[in-house]
Amino acid sequence: MIIALAVRLLVRRPHQRRRARTGLQAYGIGLLHGMGGSAGVGVLLLASIPNHVEALAALVLFAFFTAVSMAMASTSFGFALSRGPVLRSYLTVAPAMGVLSLAFGVWYALGALSAVPYVF
């Protein structure tokens, strides 16, 4: 997913249409991001609670408040990025961010396949 989003950023940047994402696209990206970032914590939460009813309640609360906090953070970040000077700076560094994201995604995928050494 990191590689796909990086390629999308790099391909979209030369076209300069500055078309905003639809709400559905933003939701899809956020959903994938949330699943990747929170799934491990959710599994640990479920594993630590022996009672199934309590575990389900904890998972529902965890998922709901994770969604609320991510929505608030995304809204704040999006608002800041869409303002004049910050937007101009972002448009300047977007290609570098795309290249770095692409390199990281390729390195991460190769690491998962044990094709590159684990550095950290």
Image (cartoon, rainbow, N blue to C red):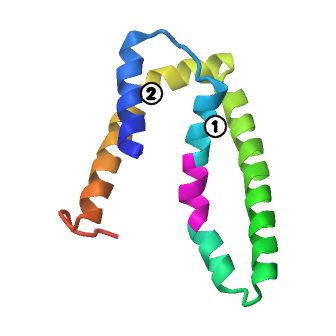
> Where does the magenta region start and end?
32-39
Q: Residue 36 location in percent, x, y?
A: 53, 57
* Numbered marks: total: 2
Camera-nearest residue between 25 and 9: 25
Which of the image's four quarters has the N terminus? Answer: top left
Local packing at callout 2 (Cα closer than 10 Å; few below 14, some 14-19, many 20+) is some
Please state which of residues 83 and 64 is positioned toward the viewer in this rendering: 64
| Image-based side of 22 in relation to 101, left or right | right
Q: Residue 73 has which mark?
A: none
Q: Is residue 112 magenta?
A: no
User: In front here: 34 or 111?
Assistant: 34
Check disc 2 and give the amino acid type.
Answer: Ala
Q: Residue at x 61, y 53 (%)?
A: 34
Q: Secondary structure at mark 2?
A: helix
Could you classify mark 1 by the number of other residues whose Cα lies within 10 Å: few (under 14), some (14-19), or many (20 or more)?
few
From what the image shows, is residue 62 above or below residue 104? below
Q: Seen in the image, is 110 located left or right of residue 12?
A: left
Residue designated by label 1 = 27
Give residue 116's position: percent from left, percent from top.
Answer: 20, 63
Residue 77 vs 108, above or below: the answer is above
- Front-lying residue, 65 or 91: 65
35 is higher (above) or lower (below) than 29: below
Q: Which residue is mark 2?
A: 94
Q: Position of residue 40 (x, y in %)?
A: 56, 70
8 displayed left or right of 69: left
What's the magenta bit mostly, secondary-structure-wise?
A: helix
Q: With respect to residue 98, does 91 lie above or below?
A: above
Q: Identity of the amino acid at label 1?
A: Tyr
Find the distance from the CA under tag 2 to the CA under tag 1.
Answer: 21 Å
